[in-house]
Amino acid sequence: MSKTSGQRRKGTSKSRRASVLRNVPKDAFSFANLLKRPEFLRTCVAIFFFLVVVSSLATWSREQIKIRDGQIASNTRITRIDYSLEDTASTEARREEARNSSPRIYVINATFVERLAASLIGLPTAVAGKTSVDEVNPELAEQFNITPETLQALQLMSRDGEATSAWRRYVSRIITELQRRSPLLTNEEFQLFTTTPASNRALFEGNEKYLIPYQAEAVALPTEQTPSTEHRLAEIASRAGFPEALVPLIETRLVSDSQPSIQLDEEDTAARADTAEREVKPVVKDHSRGEIIWKRGDVINTAQYEQALVEQEQFLATASLSERWLPRIGSIGLLAMLSIFIGAYTTITYPRIAKNTLRLIALCALMAIMLGLSVIITLEAPTFIYAAAIIPTLFAVTVSCLAYKQRMGMFIAFMQCTFITMALSQSIGWFILLIAGCGTMIGQLREVRQRQTLIRASGVTAITFAIGAFFLGLAEVPDLSIAWKQILTNSVVAGGSALIVGFFVLGILQNIEQLFNITTGMTLADYRDPRNPLLRQLQQLAPGTFNHSRQVADIAETATEAIGGDSLLAYVGGLYHDIGKMNKPEYFVENQTGYNRHKDLKPSMSLLIIIGHVKDGIELAREYDLPRELIHFIEAHHGTTLVEYFYHAAMKEAEENGEPINEMQFRYPGPKPQTKEAAVLMISDAIESASRVLPDPNPARIEALVRDLSRKRLLDHQLDDCGLTFRELAKVEDAIIVRLNSIYHTRIKYPEESKPDPEDPEVVEAEKEGDLAG
């Protein structure tokens, strides 16, 4: 029967609450009013600049080539426009061929030839009538190596002291021979001459006349390093008609000057080669739209990579405005949608960000900087694209999770992974890999109370990334036989990247807390230690307050867990919320041993002492450099509530004296709780103080006390700024009731015997006396 009636009361309470909520007037949405809100305008400016940076990075990155020769292509790349381009290699090859095909121009060594002809024509005349070599000029004899036999044969080549016509024919023939058929050349030029086709040789004969092709069998002038060429010279002399007895004489004369009969005209040869090179037209290669540069699975070679670079350059230079800007506008539009979503979600879901635009700016800056690092590293070293994508992304996600808990971390993970996948032009497989790895890290960072938590999280995340990278490689690379090394390397790099992030974040965790003005679980765990100097001092100077704080911390921890809040933060906040009582511990009831010092003081003086413990606590917290989040528990654990005990005492005096009383003078200075955890602590503190002076704390009285004090805080508007809902408040009340019943474990009465009565005078008196505990 009692159970049925209890369920009926519960159902009636819910229906009444729903009816009240339906009748509560809701503010109509007004865009004009929204524009008047300064935080909205600041958010818009922050998101706009974030969009500019992110869209610039993403659109620029998407237009770059993020692969190098030697890597395996994960997708097919084609040309996007028709364009023609000079084939530099082919053009250079043809020009080189033209230079090589240009004739080598030779000219007659006129000085040598004329001197040779003169000496040969005049030789018979010079030795005419001489009967012995001694009669011949020694220089002439040495020049021709004249012997008695050759001297005697020379006498036959002269008549009346002049050379015979036959001799003159012989000389004319050998001169022609040395110019056209068997030229004398230096050893270096001989090598080039004999290896050059006749069609590429020409002899300039004067008067703009050239002998081409120049078909001749050159003879190298003898040197110390080269063998003798006497037999070739003898053949030349014999073909010219000289008698056999005079052939040695001619041979000696030909080589005595060591001069070539023809020479290379370097200037004319170079000019003709330059002209031939200039006349070669550039080789132009046409590329059609849709032409395949490389296929998925190809091992990129240098030619393909350079062709892709050229195609990219040609596209940006010659593509139409629509071809270039429509993809950019599409990317910017998508990024704008994501940016607006980021701004709206963060400011609506997280009041801390909405109230402080600097937090949103810091969050956007973190995402933009990490995106920039990913893009730059990928473009500079595409081989390390896995590290470039994973390290900055996982770092941004980890920091966000530590700063704003798991829900925000997961949201940032989705956004950052989307940005990275889009900026690096990767497939949906990359997004899955990144979000799986980031989700693994986030799932293990609910409470980071120990260093091992972060290390373990990074280790598990590394395994996730390594396995994911392996599967991604199998999905993207068609031929495993040529890519298995790359897949394994990428898996190792992906896993190692996650480990790097974990240890790096662990090293700079204190800087992250300072930058985002947050307190992580590890820091809170340190402050939870009873050996903390401030807690030891509280225990020594105000042991009653210390025990009270521990009870409040336990209750607040339990109640915060019931609504899914940060129970560790609530617990540590409970430990430190009353540290200001150390300055005057004997004025607080939990530290008194029978004598109440407030009996000797006026209510106004007692009020100053009671309220002063909040200010003293804030000063102590700042002196000991407590985190800002813990300071908020100290300043807001009473909010702006009324100190009812002294207010009513002052009212009695005022009635006797006829002096007016201002209620605001008997209220704490505030502020009101700004977080759910601080609101839970406020309720827990008031209930724990009142429950200690509650006679016969049976379940009914405990429930009445909890409901009444919670309702008073609600009706006093103390919970307006903390974001606590009615449903969560009910859960907090239920959790506190269970906790107090476990503390004051009296005999459980039947429901009809233990109906809560909020008007129970003992309950009301306990609530008033609880004010003495501060």
Image: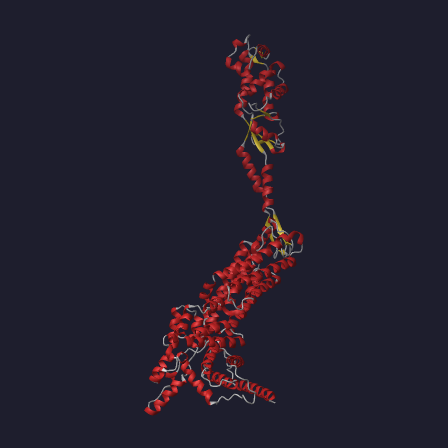
Residue 244 as seen in the image, left or right of residue 375: right
- Residue 162's x, y, as percent? 56, 13
- Residue 37's x, y, as percent? 45, 76
Q: How is the image coloured?
A: secondary structure
Residue 167 as seen in the image, left or right of residue 515: right
Is 84 placed above or below 226 here?
Answer: below
Asked if residue 720 can be seen in this view, the reply is: no
Residue 315, picture quadrant: bottom right
Q: Residue furthest top?
A: 131
Q: Look at 33% across and 92% down and name the residue there.
A: 656
What is the number of callouts on the image?
0
Is 157 placed above or below 666 here?
Answer: above
**The one of 613 and 58 positioned closer to us in this rendering:** 613
**The one of 347 and 308 positioned closer to us in this rendering:** 347
- Residue 575's x, y, as percent? 45, 73
Asked if residue 123 can be seen in this view, the reply is: yes
Which image quarter is the N terminus in? bottom right
Is 150 placed above or below 272 here?
Answer: above
**The one of 336 and 130 positioned closer to us in this rendering:** 336
- Residue 105's x, y, as percent? 57, 32
**The one of 661 and 250 positioned closer to us in this rendering:** 661
Which image quarter is the C terminus in? bottom left
